[in-house]
Amino acid sequence: MKSIEETSLLYEISQSLNKHMDMKKSLFKVLSVLSESLNLVRGIIFLTNTETGEIRIEMAHGISKDKTKQIKYLPGEGIIGQVIQTGKPAVVPRISEEPLFLDKTHSRNLTQGQDYSFICVPIKKESRVVGAISADRPYEGKRSLENGEKLLSVVATMVAHHVINIETIRVEKEQLKTENLRLKSELENKYSFSNIIGNSNKMREVLQMISQVSSSSATVLIRGESGTGKELVANSIHYNSERNQNPFIKINCAAIPDNLIESELFGHEKGAFTGASATKKGKFEIANTGTIFLDEIGNMELGAQVKLLRVLQEKEFERVGGYKPIKTDVRIVAATNANLEEEVQQGKFRDDLYFRLNVFPIYIPSLRMRKTDIILLADHFLEKYRKEHGKEIKRITTPAIDMMMEYHWPGNVRELENCIERAVILCNEGAIHSYHLPATLQTGTKSKTLPLSLEDAVASLEKEILMDALKNTRGNINKAAKLINITVRKFSYKAARYNINYKDYR
C-alpha cells in the first residue's frame, strides 16, 4: 500500500475511534475500514476478560454473530492464544498448511482452490496485552504479508489506547455504582427503625408514628427541643419510604441568609440579581421524586414561605427571575424547635403554611422526659466512641450512671453524646467513672451529684472504688480487698460504713 493511502487509512481509523465511546461501534467501524482498504475476507478483534483471563470475540467482520457468540480461547490456545500470551505477532502464509490453526469459527472454506493468509497481531499498550486483531486475506506473496502485518500492528496500537481508556472508564463507573449501592445500603441500615435508640413508652410511640408515615407521601412536621434527634427521624422517614432510592436533600433554614433562601430553595435564572452569572437549579428541583428536609423551618422568612406554600398546594414553582413554572414531585419533611403557634399569632409565620405543614406532626420528647433511655443511649455512644478512639473501655460505673440519671440534660441526646465522647477520650481505665464526666454534671444544685465538702467527696470516691472491686470479683470480698490493696477487715469496715452488701454482687 502506498504511503499516502496508509496515512489516509490510519486517519480514518483514528476518526472512527475518537467518534465513538461505545466500544462495539468504534471497533466495528475499524474493521469496516480495514476490510475495504486491505481486501480482507474477514477480520476479528479479540479482547481478554481481565477477571477470568478468557479470550472472547468482541467484534467480527465477515462472520455471523451466531457463530462468534459462544467462541472463547484460553491464553496459549491456538495461534490467537499464543499471540495474546506472548505479545508477539503471528503470520501464517497459507492457512491450509498450518496445524496450529484451529478455525473455531468454522467460517473458512479451504476446499475452493483459493488459499488464504492469516495475520494476527497483539493489541497492547507497552507490556500490557488486552487482545488481538486477526485478518484473513487471499494469499498474495511474502511482501504483501509483511506490509499487512506492519499496518495491522499500527492499527492494533491505536485500538489498544482506545480499548484501555474505555475499559478504565467502565471499571471506574462500576466501582462508583458499587460504592453508591454500598453507601445507600449503609444509609438504609444506619437509619432503620432499629437504630433509633429508645425503649421508653414515649419513644415507642414515636417509632410507631415513623413506621406509619414512612410508607406514605404525607408532609411531616417534626417537633422537639434542640438535640432530641429530629434529623435522625427525618432520615428514617426517607430511607424507609418508597423514595429511598431518590435524592434526599437537607436544608437548614436558619443557616441561610434571608436574601438567599429563595434562590437556594427554588434556584435562579441568569441575571436575576447581581452576581447571578449563570442559571442555578434550586434544592426543590434537585430533590425531584425524592424528599427535602427543611430544618428550623420556623426561621424561614415570609417571602420564601409564600413560595413554599405554592409548592405544597400546586406542586410547582418558578426560579427567582424566571416566569416558567417548574413541576416538582417532592415530599416535604420539616422540623422546628420553635413554638409555631405563637409565631403564627405574632405574624412571624403564615397560618396557611402552618396548617399545610402540620399534616402529620411527630413530637420528639426531651431526654429528661425519657430518662429510662439514658443508660441505653450511654451504652450505645460508649461502644461507638470506644471503637472510634481505640479504647478498651468495658462499662460505665454505677456512680457515673447515677450522676447521668440525676442530670436534667438541657442539650438532650446531643449533649449526652458529647459527654460520653469526652469521657472516652479522658478515660485510660477499663471503666468510665464519675470524675470522667464533664463539670456540668458534677456541679450545680440541679444535678445534686457532687458533695460540697472535701470529706464527702472522698467518701463518694471511696464508695465507688469498693463497689467496682466487688463487681469485678463477683462479690468475693477477699479478692476485692486484694484487688484494691487493703485488708479484708478494712474492706468489711468501709463496706458496712457505706451500706454495701457484698452478697448483692454475686
Image (tube, rainbow, N blue to C red):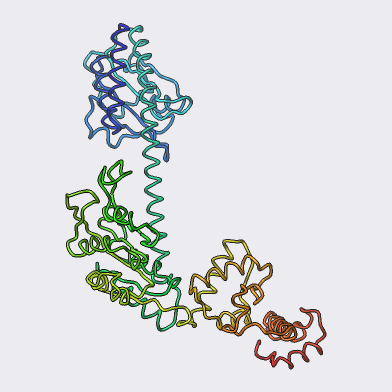
- Picture mark count: 0
In this view, the residue in front, 171 or 451, is: 451
168 left or right of 16? right
Q: Position of residue 199 (x, y in %)?
A: 44, 80
Q: Position of residue 242 (x, y in %)?
A: 27, 63
Q: Position of residue 212 (x, y in %)?
A: 29, 74
State the image quarter where residue 334 is shown.
bottom left
> Considering the image in quadrants, where does the C terminus appear?
bottom right
Residue occupying the point 28% across, 34% down: 22
In this view, the residue in front, 211 or 338, is: 338
Tell me if residue 112 comes above or below residue 239 in the rendering.
Answer: above
Tell me if residue 478 comes above or below residue 416 in the rendering.
Answer: below
State the image quarter where residue 291 is shown.
bottom left
Q: Position of residue 445 (x, y in %)?
A: 59, 84
> Considering the image in quadrants, where does the N terminus appear?
top left
In this view, the residue in front, 240 or 209, is: 209
